[in-house]
Structure formats: C-alpha cells, structure tokens
Amino acid sequence: MNAGEIMNEVQFDQMRVSQDPRAGMAVVVLQQVSKIFYRGATVIHALRDVSVQIGRGEFCALVGPSGSGKSTLLHLLAGLDRPTSGEIFLNGHSTLELTDDQWTAIRRTEIGIVFQAFHLVPGLTVEENVALPLRLQGHNRRAIRARVREMLDLVKMGHRARHRPYELSGGEQQRVAVARAFVHRPRLIIADEPTGNLDSRNGDAIVELLRHSARTFGRTVVLATHSEAAACAADRRLCLHDGQLVMES
C-alpha cells in the first residue's frame, strides 16, 4: 500500500501468529479442515477434510446445494467460528492460535464481508454506514469522508449518501453493503449469497463489483452462491457436497 492508503495492514508478527512455508504465497489456505456441530445426540459433519488454496486477486465461487458447507466455510475464513480440526492460513500465517480480539482486528483491516441480508444500521445514513469500519479504526474525519465518497462513487450510490436504508431499494442497499465491505481496502472479500435477495439485474451488478475488485485491485474474493450466473463470472468454481470438496473447475 502507498502512503495515501487510509488503512495500515495488520502486523501479524505483532500478534504472535506463526508462519508456515507449507502455506506458500496463497492468500487463503485450508489444510484438512473439518467442522462438526452437535445438536443433542446428533453429530453434523458440516465440513470434512477440506484442503484448498486461493491466490491473490482470484475470484472463487463456492457452489453446492443448501447444507453442503458453503456458509460454514466462509464463517471459518472470517474467524466467526473455529474449525474442529485442520488449519487455516491467511497470507501465509496460521490462524490456529488467534484470540477473538485478534480475529476482530483482522476483520476490521484484512477482511470485508458481504451478507445476503444487508445488515445496514437503520438509523444511520448511507455515508455513515459505509464509514463505520474506518471509524472503528479511529481515522480522522477528513480521511473518512474522502474514502467514503470514493467508495460510494464506485458503487454508483453517491447521490444517495444522505438517505437511510429504509429509503433504498434492495439493490441499492446491497451496493451500500458492498461499499462498506470495500472501504477499508481488505485483502480478502467474503460474500455469502449476496445476490440471493436481488433480481437478476441488481444481482449481476453486485457480482460485477466483486469481479472488478478482484481484477482491478487484486482483492481475493470468495463467493458462496446458488446462482449459476454468479458462479460463471468467477475465475474458479469449488463444489461442495455433504461438507466435502468434490470438484474444482
């Protein structure tokens, strides 16, 4: 990043995480990752020994039927849950020993998340919603305003900056959610069914924004989707079935 960037990169060595040469130069590496949930006496194998590498600037689509493990995998990548076994590396560094506070710091700087439900704060304006990740980092108002304006222009929502979420269409709300996920310039974008509540035109626009982020800015994008059109827009497709990685294309 150059001096004009708002956000500093996370200093993983200061958080005492290990680096492992097996992880190579990939942004995301999963090594035999499994996740088990228990519901009473029932054991649910959400993921089974998943191993995969995803590189810088790669747009990767996770596909498969409901319950195949797509959302579980994304939650593990974002540190919202922990694997039962196996190991996950981000930018060559193991996440195995990260504390909850360290994961929070990484999400605020290194990871942007776009959900199917937009998760905008109802009482805040569009520009205030987009500014939230930067405010959490304590940046000055002038820098925040400039960066928010840049992101709203990118998603073509600058004219709606002073509106609140209830005044926006579903497609507009998702554009704002994308701007918020991009605003801190994360290296990894995680998108969980971001087009699921949108019509095809608005869904295509969101997928194009994700693809633009990967190709233009070198962001790594991991998208879980049921949409064939969205999957076809990705550089690579990973198919999950019953928690197992059954095909790559």
Image (spheres, rainbow, N blue to C red):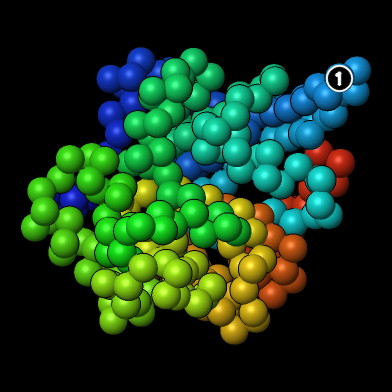
> Residue 118 location in percent, x, y?
51, 59
**Residue located 83% across and 29% down the image:** 45
Nearer to us in this view, 169 or 70: 169
Q: Is residue 178 above or below residue 77?
A: below
In the image: residue 48, left or right of residue 218: right
Q: Is residue 114 above or below residue 34?
A: below
Q: Quadrant of the C terminus?
A: bottom right
Nearer to us in this view, 49 or 128: 128
In the image: residue 3, left or right of residue 74: left
Which residue does the numbered mark 1 point to in the structure image? 40
Look at the numbered disc 1 and give the secondary structure of its residue: loop
Q: Which image quarter: residue 127?
A: bottom left
> Residue 170 location in percent, x, y?
54, 73
Q: Which image quarter: residue 76?
A: top right
Neighbor class of circle 1 (other Cα within 10 Å; few <14, some 14-19, many 20+) is few
Look at label 1 and name its amino acid.
Gly
**Residue located 81% across and 38% down the image:** 243
Q: Is residue 91 something that shows in the picture?
A: yes
**Residue located 41% across and 18% down the image:** 17
Question: Which residue is most to the bottom?
Answer: 201
Nearer to us in this view, 15 or 180: 180
Q: Is residue 181 something that shows in the picture?
A: no
In the image: residue 32, left or right of residue 105: right
- Numbered marks: total: 1
Question: Which residue is most to the right?
Answer: 41
Nearer to us in this view, 147 or 87: 147
> Residue 114 location in percent, x, y?
51, 55
In the image: residue 177, left or right of residue 85: left
**Residue located 58% across and 57% down the image:** 117
